[in-house]
Amino acid sequence: MKRRRSPYDAIDPAQLIARDWLALSRSRLANERTLLAYIRTAVALAGLGAIVAKWFEHDAALAAAIVMVAAGVLTALFGVLRFATEERRLRPLERRAENDDHPGPG
């Protein structure tokens, strides 16, 4: 499978200024917050499914509970995959900066 080019591949880390490093840090923190939102939603869906399965004893309720738990698992998987993809796009810029004797984000 062909690797998609990151929009950050064309950026020269030696030309980044403090504002750019701060923007990169904000992007990474936003990515982490988004992952936590996906996980929070996944836990809520799975928990609601478990509650529905426990309280209601109809076949329709059991089917709805299974759907909710499955939706929670899929939401968590999608969030982790999205996080990993964005992290992979941001990481090469920092790695190149470390190799270029540039002070980087610190």
Image (spheres, rainbow, N blue to C red):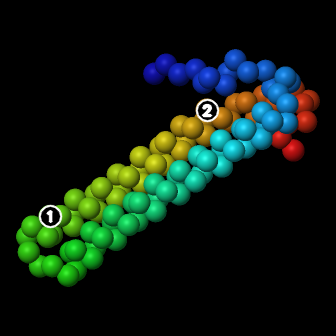
User: In the shown orientation, is residue 97 left or right of residue 45?
Assistant: right
User: In the shown orientation, is residue 19 left or right of residue 3?
Assistant: right
The residue tagged 1 is 63
Kindly identify the amino acid type of the residue bearing the numbered disc 1: Ala
Res 86 quadrant in image? top right
Secondary structure at badge 1 equals helix
Q: Is residue 58 above or below residue 10?
A: below
Q: x and y percent of residue 60 in the render? A: 9, 67
Q: Is residue 33 above or below residue 19?
A: below
Please report the residue visible at 21 percent of the width from the left and 67 percent of the height from the top.
65
User: In the shown orientation, is residue 27 left or right of residue 20?
Assistant: left
Q: Can I make out residue 18 in this image?
A: yes
Q: Quadrant of the C terminus?
A: top right
Q: x and y percent of residue 91 in the render? A: 68, 36
Q: Can I make out residue 99 in this image?
A: no
Q: Earlier in the sequence, mark 1 or mark 2?
A: 1
Q: Quadrant of the N terminus?
A: top left
Kindly identify the amino acid type of the residue bearing the numbered disc 2: Arg
Please report the residue visible at 22 percent of the width from the left and 80 percent of the height from the top.
54
Q: x and y percent of residue 15 in the render? A: 84, 23
Q: Residues within 10 Å of mark 1 (few under 14, many from 20)?
A: few
The residue tagged 2 is 89
Please report the residue visible at 28 percent of the width from the left and 73 percent of the height from the top.
50
User: In the shown orientation, is residue 16 left or right of residue 26?
Assistant: right
Q: Residues within 10 Å of mark 2 (few under 14, many from 20)?
A: some
Q: Is residue 72 above or below residue 89?
A: below
